[in-house]
Amino acid sequence: MADFELDIKQCIKAIENGGTILYPTDTVWGIGCNATDEAAIEKVFALKNRPKEKSLIVLLADAKDVLQYVAAPPPDIIAILESFDRPTTVIYEGAIGFADNAVNENGSIAIRVTNDPFCKALIKRMQKPLVSTSANISGAPTASFYNQISPAIINGVDYVVQYRQDDTEPKQPSRLVKMDDEGNIEVLRP
């Protein structure tokens, strides 16, 4: 874990100052910021040239954290989330505690509980949810690896994580599902 300690400190410094970061996740490289900071989220939309109607994904460190950010999660949500065998982003109704521009206009939020050690450590230290949107200009191909990220993105964030920049092991993309307050799951992207 010590190999990414400096990156964690620098990310926290950038995020606490309302900045954005470029970082590796359990799926692809992402652009992130504090999901409760409206101005920082605006920077992410501007950098990606992304329409504000397109929602962002938020990462949390632990399944129990969902209870803090979703108004009416299913009673067995922690068991459901812990049963997933791959990165899964879940769309929930009734987002609470996020900046308004992180939440879809219908009040839903897309959350993935990460298993990535770097992301987990960063989120736990921030004690805030972390925006996680792919590190590309909206409409451009998603960068699976650091060397595929556009210089406009690299130069446009406040801090670029050094950890895993040379990683070329393909990661499985996140499954996308929608879950209602009873725990019924609709798969939107397998």
Image (spheres, grey):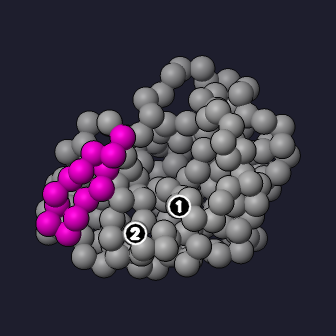
Judging by the rendered image, the residue that carries numbered circle 2 is 108
Circles 1 and 2, Cβ within 8 Å, touching? The answer is yes
Indicate the secondary structure of the residue bearing disc 2.
loop
> Magenta segment, principal secondary structure?
strand
Front residue of 51/43: it is 51
Q: Where is 171 relative to 27, above or below?
A: above
Q: Residue at x 56, y 53 (%)?
A: 132
Quadrant for residue 39, please give it: bottom right
Q: Amino acid at mark 1?
A: Ser
- The stretch in magenta equals 177-189
Work out how far the residue at label 1 is from the one at label 2, CA to CA, in angstroms.
9 Å
Image-based side of 144 in relation to 45, left or right: left
Q: Is residue 165 magenta?
A: no
Judging by the rendered image, the residue that carries numbered circle 1 is 55
Q: Amino acid at mark 2?
A: Ser
Q: Residue at x 57, y 65 (%)?
A: 53
